Image (cartoon, rainbow, N blue to C red):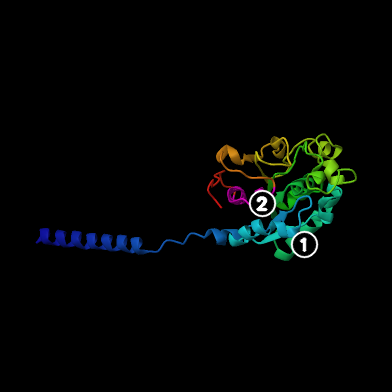
Amino acid sequence: MLLRKTALVLSLATAALLASTATATAAPAAPEPTPVAVAAAANPVIVVGGLSGVAVAYEPIAARLRADGYRTFIYQLPGLGLGDIPTSARAFATYVGQVRASTGAATVDVVAHSEGGLVARYYLKRLGGTATVGRYVSLGSPQYGTYVANIVAFLGLGSCAGIVACQQMTIGSAFLADLNAGDDTPGTVRYTTIRTLQDELVRPTGNAAVNDGATNVLIQAYCPLRVVGHLGLVLDGTSYTIVRGALVDGPVRPNCLAL
C-alpha cells in the first residue's frame, strides 16, 4: 500500500513538472525588433553634400537610408559650397536646429560627402555641435587637404582663384591648420571616415582620415577589387554597407558584393 501511494505521488509530481516545462517551452519569446524598426527609432540622419553637389545627387544614398527606416534629410551647401567653409558651417548649425525641432530628436547623425565633411566637422569642433550630433560619417572628405587644390578646374569651371572653399581645402591652408589643431574628434561623437584609393579629388587619399580615435575605413583594405571613385562613395553599395554599420555602432564588415 505504501509503495502504491509513493508511486502515485511520484507520478503526479512528474506530470506536474512535465506540464510546467511544456508551458514554459510553449510561451512565445518576445520578438526581436526589425532593423527598420530600430532605424525608425534612431537619430535622424542628415546627408551633407559636397562642393558643387546639388541635393538631387544625394538622393540615391538618402533613398537607401529611408528604405532602411531612417528619417533622412539632405543638406545642400549654401552657394553649392563655393564660399567660406566656416560660414557654411554656421548655416548648417541652423539647419541641424531645424531638423531637431521638426523631429523632436535631441541629436542627429551626419553622413557627409567631400567638403560637407569639413563643414560638419567645423560645426562639431568650433560651433558646439558635439552636443547635438551622435555619429559623424565622412565620405571622401579632404580632412587634411588635397593636392588637387584646383578642384573647380577639375570640374571644368575655371581656376581656384576666387573660389574660397577650394583655397581652404588646399594642404596647409589656414582653415585646415585651425580645424586640425588639437583633437580631431572632440566630444562623445562616434567618428567614422570612409575613403577609396580611386578618389580623383582627394590626394593623397590618406588625407581623408582623421586621428584621435576615429574609425578610418579604406574600402580596398577589405575589398581589394572594388573600384570606387569620389562621387561613387555616395552611390556604391559597398560604401553604403560601411555607412549603415557606422550608424548602428557595428563592426566594420563591408559587403564587397553589394550593389
Dot 1 crowding, Cα within 10 Å, few <14, some 14–19, many 20+: few
Residue 211 in view (yes/no): no
Q: Please tell me which residue lies in front, 234 or 2.
A: 234
Residue 120 in view (yes/no): yes
Q: Please tell me which residue lies in front, 228 or 175.
A: 228
Numbered disc 1: secondary structure? helix
Q: Please tell me which residue lies in front, 152 or 39.
A: 152
Height in image: 6 above or below 196?
below
Height in image: 185 above or below 53?
above
Query: Which quadrant does the N terminus fall into?
Result: bottom left
Residue type of the residue flagged with mark 1: Gln
- Residue 255 image point, x, y percent: 54, 47
Magenta span: 231-248
Q: Which residue is mark 1?
A: 98
- Residue 37 image point, x, y percent: 56, 62
Drawn side of residue 119 relative to residue 72, left or right: right
User: Does the magenta-highlighted stretch encompass residue 236?
Assistant: yes
Q: Kindly report which numbered mark, 2 or 1, lies closer to the viewer in this rendering.
A: 2
Q: Which residue is mark 2?
A: 234
